[in-house]
Amino acid sequence: LKSVDLSVNKLSKLPDSISGWGARLHTLNLGSNALASLPESVGDLVGLKKLIISSNKLNILPLALGKLTSLQELRASDNSVVELPDCFGSLDMLAEVDLAGNNLKGLPPSFFHLRGIQRLLLSRNKLEEIPPGLAGVKSLLFLDVADNCSISCVPPLLLKNTLIFDMRLQGNKIQRLAFRDTDGYAEFMARRKGKIDQKLDAKMQHIDIGLCGLD
């Protein structure tokens, strides 16, 4: 058993016995159900690489997520999560996290120890600032914090210390001119130009040459 798709099934609860699905399970899709919680036994699915729990009724995620050391992609958008468990420090394989459309006001300290994350989606939450700790996540390439409403600036160290080359910033209090005056903006734009040039050379279509949604 390598993949289980239980999406759009009106599920309100999962049994603890999901641990019996085995360590060979790579993909688990629980999206678009009515789940209010996940059992701690989800942590027994240690071979899991992709976990989709978007569009449920979750307001917490289990600490057992920290046991999923093979996890590469976590999709938990459009729930009601108010706080993440502080269990991300061991998830070195995690490359993409989608937490858009929740009620998050921040990220736990362990999140800033992720070594491989490249894409982080935090739009439509309740962030009042871009978490400063993200400046230490040097692998980060793309950050979406659109439509949090209250964010007023981009931390300079985020632009200077990471590999980030693209962001979504619209729907906040960030002003285009103020962003351009931020320390580290030149380094960010140099990386962004390099990526755009690569796409142009590859004759890719639909290339976004705007300024992070602030146009």
Image (cartoon, rainbow, N blue to C red):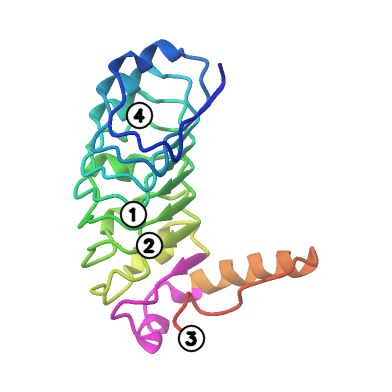
Q: Give the distance between the C-alpha atoms of the residues marked 4 and 1, in whole angstroms.
A: 17 Å
Residue type marked 1: Leu
Q: First in sequence: mark 3 or mark 1?
A: 1
Q: Distance between the residues labelled 3 and 1?
A: 24 Å
Q: Do the residues labelled 4 and 1 touch (CB within 8 Å)?
A: no
Secondary structure of residue under mark 2: helix
Q: Quadrant of the N terminus?
A: top right
User: Is the C-beta separation of discs 3 and 1 under 8 Å?
Assistant: no
Specify the label residue 158 is tagged with. Answer: 2
Circle 1 sits on which residue? Answer: 134
For image coordinates 36% across by 65% down, the residue present is 145
Disc 2/disc 4 C-alpha distance (Å): 22 Å
Closer to the camera in the image, 73 or 12: 12
Segment tinted magenta in the rendering: 166-186
Q: Do the residues labelled 1 and 2 touch (CB within 8 Å)?
A: yes
Q: What residue type is labelled 3?
A: Asp
Q: In this picture, is 48 found above or below 146? A: above
Specify whether residue 173 is painted magenta: yes
Q: Which of marks 2 and 4 is nearer the N terminus?
A: 4
Earlier along the polypeptide chain: callout 4 or callout 3?
Answer: 4
Q: Mark 3 points at which residue?
A: 215
Q: Is residue 63 magenta?
A: no
Q: Which of 203 and 98 is in front in this view?
A: 98
The percent position of residue 202, horizontal first and vertical second, equals 79, 63
The answer to whether 168 is drawn above or below residue 65 in the figure is below
User: Residue at the location (40% across, 44% down)?
Assistant: 32
Q: Which mark sits nearer the N-terminus, 4 or 1?
A: 4
- Callout 2, which amino acid? Leu
Q: Residue lying at the far front in this picture: please name it.
A: 10
Decide which of tag 1 and tag 2 comes sooner along the chain: 1
Q: Nearer the viewer's eye, disc 3 or disc 1?
A: 3
